[in-house]
Amino acid sequence: QALFPGSSKSSTGVTSGGTLPPGLTEEEAEEIQVELTKVEDEIQTLRQVLVVKERHATELKRRLGIGPLSEIKQNFTKGWHEVQCSNAYLTASATFEEIGRSDAYKKTQETLSQAGHMTSAAFSSMGSAIRNRFGEIRNSPSFKSFEDKVENMKYKVMGRSNGESDHSPTSNNAPF
């Protein structure tokens, strides 16, 4: 790739045939270029060695019966232990303990507890009222009449089966 007419860019990004950075001679640039090439080669070699070492470690873990899931569990346990030992966690934990002992926290906790009890009582009372109202509706003459009509309709549609008698069902043997 040409950066300037008559110049080209090497694989490391140094231009040849162009202008050098200020304060750098061509000889210094060549030395730096050689050193950069060596370092990049070393980096590539280290990457290859790392890949081989990771494969070897994976094989050793497999032979020991350590699967990916147990490895994740170990990493999580180790990480959680490190978090618990960290200064930030210890400071926050101490702060929460102080808050838990404060009067404001105790008052808030007591108020929320009372609100929970009152809410529970209100729902219980509402449930009782609804249950009583449904009981009243079920025992009303209108509901009994509706129930008889549904039973008669069922009798007419289903017919006499399962040894039922010749008379239609009454509200005395209704399923409700």
Image (cartoon, rainbow, N blue to C red):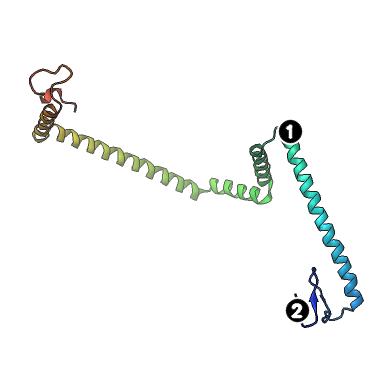
Q: Within the image, what quadrant is residue 69 found in?
A: top right
Q: CA distance from mark 1 to mark 2?
A: 54 Å
Nearer to me, 53 or 142:
53
Relative to 133, residue 168 above or below: above
Q: Position of residue 3 (x, y in %)?
A: 75, 79
Determine which of the numbered discs, if any, sits on residue 63 in the image.
1
Residue beneath the point at 84% across and 81% down: 22
Residue beneath the point at 23% across and 35% down: 131
Of the 4 image quadrants, the one containing the N terminus is bottom right
Relative to 14, residue 60 above or below: above
Determine which of the numbered discs, if any, sits on residue 170 in the image.
none
Disc on the earlier residue, 1 or 2: 2
Q: Residues within 10 Å of mark 1 (few under 14, many from 20)?
A: few
Of the 4 image quadrants, the one containing the C terminus is top left
Amino acid type at circle 1 is: Arg
Front: mark 1 or 2: 2
Relative to 19, residue 34 above or below: above
Q: Residues within 10 Å of mark 2 (few under 14, many from 20)?
A: few
Mark 2 = which residue?
3
Nearer to me, 112 or 70:
70
Q: Position of residue 174 (x, y in %)?
A: 15, 25
SS state under label 2? loop
Relative to 154, residue 99 above or below: below
Q: Position of residue 136 (x, y in %)?
A: 15, 34
Residue beneath the point at 44% across and 44% down: 110
Q: Position of residue 41 (x, y in %)?
A: 84, 59
Amino acid type at circle 2 is: Leu
Horizontal side of 106 relative to 46 (left or right) equals left
Disc 1 and disc 2 in contact, CB within 8 angstroms: no
Q: Within the image, what quadrant is residue 40 found in?
A: bottom right
SS state under label 1? helix
